[in-house]
Amino acid sequence: MNTRNRTCRYSVCWLVGLLGALLSLGNLIAPQDSLQGAETIAKVAAKPFSLTLRKRVPSAEKSPLFNAVQEKQQWQAKETAVIVCDMWDLHHCLNATLRGGEMAPRMNRVLNEARLRGATIIHAPSSCMEPYKNHPGRKRAQAAPAAKNLPTDISKWCYSIPSEEQGEYPIDQTDGGEDDEAEAHRKWAEKLKAMGRNPRAPWKSQTDLLDIHDADIISDNGIEIWNVLEQRGIKNVILVGVHTNMCVLGRPFGLRQMAKNGKNVVLMRDMTDTMYNPARKPYVSHFTGTDLIVEHIEKWVCPTITSDQVIGGKVFQFKHDQRPHVVIVSAEREYKTETTLPVFALKHLGKEFRVSFVYGNDVNAKQRNNLPGISVLDDADLLLVSARRRVLPKAQMEVVRKFIEAGKPVVGIRTANHAFSLRGKEIPAGLADWENFDAEVIGGHYTGHHGEGPKVVLAVAKGAATHPILNKLDTSQWQGQGSLYLVSPLAKSATALLHGTVPGKPTEPIAWVNTNKFGGRVFYTSLGHPDDFKNPATNQLLYQAIRWATGLPANQASASK
């Protein structure tokens, strides 16, 4: 019997066995219920994968700015394989071992569901084939006929593909990426040695938290896996496992090889982990390091999906990943926040926050009123707005309104108080404004600004010195670099933190907090000129405002540390 017949026979036997188990319940299940159960099983087995693929596209031609966009696709299960990369039983990094164990139960649910629908499951615990030498799945991989289209380098590790040369690799992993504390790592190495394991390479098998069925495939060989994919007519590949920045990307069966050789490949981004040490550049949290690698993959290698698209429920999140999610919208041309805010976010937010960017689509004037990827707000804890006079497609404006009207926090800088206003101009068909955004959300009264020229002298507002946002903030010698905005009077619900003055003109609030009409916390500052970000005090102000708005306590350390 050939491999395909054995697989079909196994699937039929499995379904018959499950149906028999239902029938054997006797009086507990009525005959008609049993028939309905069989129909349900058959429907599940024939159900395609309804996936939402996320990738990054430039906000304009040759732009260095990328927006995350989504595309819905239907993948037939029989044309789909799930490859489990290096989910070993043990790892030389204790934290990696713990995170793998935490993720494995949900991954197993993904595999079980994919298998039930008819997808091919390929277990690829590299360098661990010996325990499986007599397993049907191992023999099946070895017996697959040689593919006629075997790529010449499919047996090799792939360190990069041409598209990646357009970008910069986002993290420093030259130390191997271990993120253990020194003492914990020492004790873990001793424990591995006492178990008879090599502390540098302790893996011997795949974790037993993942089920391996007789009908599955077991291989760590790129040629064998490619042969199986071609034998079964596999067009689509889902990669799960560890570690994204190393094995998942580079193995002979990894993302790069699958992408460059023509498979529809995706990374399941919540069923993976990264080998990244926060003590290395860019000095962000371990989980932010993973985010940066995922972003790199979505730009240059392939799209990503999440486990809930297969098994429902919520997207998986590691228990120690408690970062609030900040979405930063940059859609203005005057103050270059598309340049200053990413630098600020990476340096000052990367340890404590998960950050997503949405950039205005500035391909040309007709397309400027568009925020591709704004749906990321549905999963956000805070919105930071740096936009100027943009009206949006109605569905996009509804996303913004839904977030704010739910009472969620908003931080605005510079032009945010006229972010969605065209000053009474006609709104193009199909688009929506928010003319009263300043009054309803920000709590200001923007009417214009003084001319460019004199620097704005800043001072702490009366009674505001003890506010958490101003904690340990050095306001001496602090000047605003942009023109002074006319924003008086503030709403009764707003409280000024900083005032600004220019010679011969009335003082104006330059930073304040507000509780908007929807009950949400708001911080706003008219600072935001590119040169403002050269002052550590501006960065500290914005960092502490984000902490305050998300409900985090005042941080005693500087944001730059």
Image (spheres, rainbow, N blue to C red):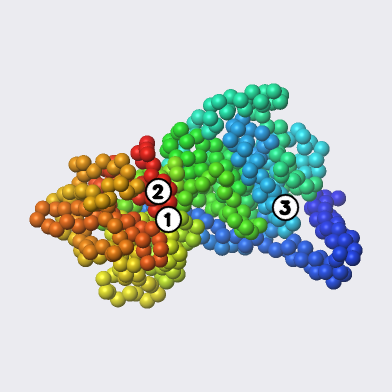
**What's the residue type where badge 1 is placed?**
Leu
In percent of the image, x 89 and y 65: which residue is there? Answer: 27
In the rendered structure, find residue 382 and report the number of the disc placed on it: 1
Whether tag 3 and tag 2 are in contact, CB under 8 A, the answer is no
Q: Identify the element where label 1 is drawn.
A: strand
Which of the marked residues, 3 or 2, is nearer the chain's N terminus?
A: 3
**Label 1 crowding class (10 Å Cα cut-off): few <14, some 14-19, many 20+?**
many
In percent of the image, x 41 and y 58: which residue is there? Answer: 409
**What's the residue type where badge 2 is placed?**
Arg
* Mark 3 and mark 2: Cα distance apart in space: 41 Å
Q: Mark 2 or mark 1, which is nearer to you?
A: 2
199 to 463, vertically: above or below:
above
Residue 226 seen by the camera = no
- The picture places residue 436, in percent across and down from the top left corner, at 32, 70
Q: Is residue 363 left or right of residue 355?
A: left
508 to 530, vertically: above or below:
below
What residue is shown with label 2?
A: 547
Q: Identify the element where label 2 is drawn.
A: helix
Taking depth in this image into account, of 407 and 134 the one nearest to the observer is 407
Which of the marked residues, 2 or 1, is nearer the chain's N terminus?
A: 1
Res. 217 image quadrant: top right
What residue is shown with label 3?
A: 112
**What's the residue type where badge 3 is placed?**
Asn
In percent of the image, x 50 and y 34: which residue is there? Answer: 277
* Mark 2 and mark 1: Cα distance apart in space: 10 Å
Q: Mark 3 or mark 2, which is nearer to you?
A: 2
